[in-house]
Image: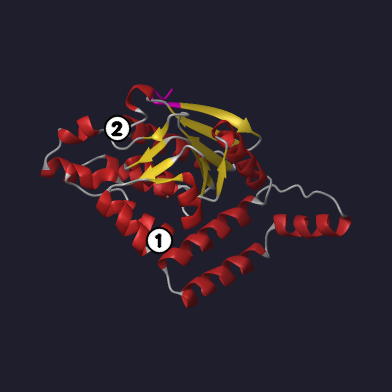
Amino acid sequence: MPHTLAVTTAATGVRLITLQRPQALNALNTELLAELADQLDLAAADHAVRAVVITGSRKAFAAGADINEMAERDLVGILDDPRVACWQRISAFAKPLVAAVNGFCLGGGCELAMHADILVAGEDARFGQPEINLGIMPGAGGTQRLLRAVGKSLAMQMVLTGQPIDARHALRAGLVSEVTQPELTVERAVAIARLIAEKAPLAVRLAKEALLKAQDTDLASGLRFERHAFTLLAGTADRDEGIRAFQDKRTPTFKGR
């Protein structure tokens, strides 16, 4: 069993992973990242899991990396940092990932949230990349994902000043999809994940992959991938089921085939 996480089934097809290092505001140490990567690998291999929600506490989603752990690493230690492999495994998770964010979401915590496909924020959420205040910079995708999410000007401001933005600003900038009352953040994230879990798994997987392609490829290449994925889905049993259900005016039953 993981020591830094709580893992439960929140709804049919939805696994809920809660970060649990309250004494450190869920700071992301090596143990937590490794356990999170392990749990996502397990969810990826479990056909009963169709979407995952990640959350923290009401006070903090995650307040950053573990500074005490980081201070122990010199240049060679950073080069050989085992957390890099953990981040790669988290990034490779192919199923839908929803982040439910309350409170502090800073540094590595903000980077983790940006690994999610959909971000739901409580009114009290604060997003930031304050690494510059320590004489360093984001190192787990913060510069790359943030700029793609909110644009050059705001990303530059957040990274170079180290100042956070609130949930409403994050919504306007496109960093999050919804803002809720803090006590409803997890509930709303689970509801979104449950809706996704009801869809055809192969279609969801390819749709997610196509959307992510749009971030790192040119339009023509992205359109080719989209058309290829669309064509592949024409050969699935779920596509036939979806069309028949529509014609019969009933709810489809998708089986991932």
Seen in the picture, residue 162 relative to 143 is either above or below; the reply is above
Residue 140's x, y, as percent?
30, 48
In what quadrant of the picture does the N terminus appear?
A: top left
* Circles 1, 2 touching at the beta carbon (< 8 Å): no
Question: Dot 2: what SS?
Answer: loop
Which contiguous range is marked in magenta? 1-5
* Residue 81 found in image quarter: top left
Q: Is residue 74 left or right of residue 240?
A: left
- Mark 1 neighbour class, 10 Å CA radius: few under 14, some 14 to 19, many 20 or more: some
Give the amino acid at mark 1: Arg
Which residue is painted at 37% across and 25% down in the image? Answer: 21
Asked if residue 50 lies in the magenta stretch, the reply is no
Q: Residue at point 76% right, 47% down?
A: 253
Q: Can residue 48 be spotted in the picture?
A: no
- On the image, numbered disc 2 is attached to which residue? 29
Q: Is residue 4 left or right of residue 251?
A: left
In this view, the residue farthest toward the bottom is 220
Q: Secondary structure at mark 1?
A: helix
Instruction: Count up the numbered dots.
Output: 2
Quadrant in which residue 113 is drawn: top left
User: In the image, is 253 to the left or to the right of 140?
Assistant: right
Q: Residues within 10 Å of mark 2 (few under 14, many from 20)?
A: many
Up/down of 221 relative to 5, above or below: below
Q: Please tell me which residue lies in front, 50 or 55.
A: 55
Q: Please provide percent x and percent y for residue 68.
A: 21, 30
Of 59 and 166, nearer the camera is: 166
Residue type of the residue flagged with mark 2: Asn
Q: Which residue is mark 1?
A: 148
Residue 151 visible? The answer is yes
Labelled disc at residue 209: none
Image point 33% across, 34% down: which residue? 28
